[in-house]
Image (cartoon, rainbow, N blue to C red):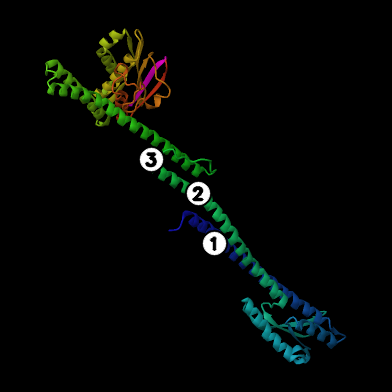
Amino acid sequence: MRSLRWQLTLAIALAALLSLAAAQMLSNLLLNRLFETYMTRQQEAMEESIVANISAQYENGAWNVDGVYAIGMLFLYDGVIIRVEDMEGRTVWDAQNHDMSRCKAIMEEIPSRMARFGQGGEFGERIYRLKLRNEEIGVLTIGSFTPYSLSESGFSFLRYLNAVPIAAFLFALIISGAIGFYMARRIAKPIVKTACIAREIASGRYGARFGKKNGTKEIEDLSTAINHLAGTLGEQEKLRRQLTADVAHEIRTPLAAIGSHLETMIEGVWQPTKERLKSCYEEILRLNAIVADLESIERSRLNRTPVDLLALAKSVGESFGAELARKKAILRVEGVSAVAPIDRDRVIGVVSNLLSNAIKYSKEGSKITITTADYPARCELTVADDGTGIKDEDIPFIFERFYRADKSRSRGTGGTGLGLAIVKSAVEAHGGGISVTSGIGKGSVFVVTLPK
């Protein structure tokens, strides 16, 4: 199994090489076409020059054989075989008659040279009618390799021209491989680190974090998500341990009371009187209440009916008349009629829990307000008090099960710590939400939102 680093390196290098290879093929094809066109035109220009120079060797009705010979020999070394005839068909000068062995060597050498270059073609002859001042003076036959021929110097130039792309290709191979390796290492390193951090998190070491920034948006998003995951799991683990301790604490007290009472009565120290059995029964009811609260949190099935939240809030407020009287607290229920499809019993539990907490943490003579509001897509119910308030560090956790701002868990300052967890569970089961704003000595405001 190849590592991600090598796969990325190979992929980047391969993509670069394929792109370069395609570009080189196109450029070579274009260069060869341009070179062929250039050489063909050069061949045509050379033959036009030969025709003009040969025609100039005819003076006063006679041919300057020495001049024709000089021109013929000059071009013979370039692979061009010339034959000049007069108007009567008599040969003025013929390169093959002059140097047959040389002409034969040229006719063998040039095709061999062109074949090494990969060019086809063959020897051919072109016939030109020679004219001087619009008067025909003879016939010129030019034999050469068509469509063009390469000299040794031309062949060397073309070979060099074809070698340049190969060198560029090898250079690009090294550069693309180096860049690909660097980029792959840059991309793979945080991914490998992510895997290591994930393994540490899986092992329970939630303190593992990404350090310095990478500079790549996607990698930054990944590292931020991993850091957030580690932090969330750490908090969840902390809450899980706290939950275990809280459950044990809440259950231990009634069980210890029941156990001690029964043990004392079994040993005969106490008589099983009605009062003592009633005390044991009350502790059992307390355990049942804890279990019922936990079950209430997990229950998600709703029996929805259209309910007016304002009327519901007034009904709940009236049921707390005795508690309000003991605290000499003043309750105001105000707002507008807000009808929503809800489970009446569960929402009564929500309002009751919030109102009970407001009374419990309020001073004598304090004011508590329940307000309802109606919006096109939602209804809101707000419970506000001017009680002791909640510390900022406790606010994120008050809806957790068994969480108590009072770490001593005194009965005088609260119950099991399940009330707000039940509230949150019931509200979220309706598809709504709950929020709180509070401050020490400033009271608390709980806002429940329920969709229509």
**In this rendering, is residue 172 above or below 135?**
above
Tell me the SS state at disc 3. loop
Q: CA distance from mark 3 to mark 2?
A: 23 Å
Q: Which mark is residue 325?
A: none
* Side of 150 where 182 appears, left or right: left
* Side of 358 where 96 appears, left or right: right
Nearer the N terminus, badge 3 or badge 2?
A: 2
Q: Which residue is mark 1?
A: 18
Q: Which residue is mark 2?
A: 189
Residue drawn where x is 84% and y is 83% of the image: 57
The stretch in magenta equals 441-451
Q: CA distance from mark 1 to mark 2?
A: 26 Å
Q: Which mark is residue 204?
A: 3
Which class describes the residues within 10 Å of circle 2: few (<14), some (14-19), or many (20+)?
some
- Residue 9 in the image: state x and y as whole percent: 52, 56
Q: Main secondary structure of the magenta part?
A: strand
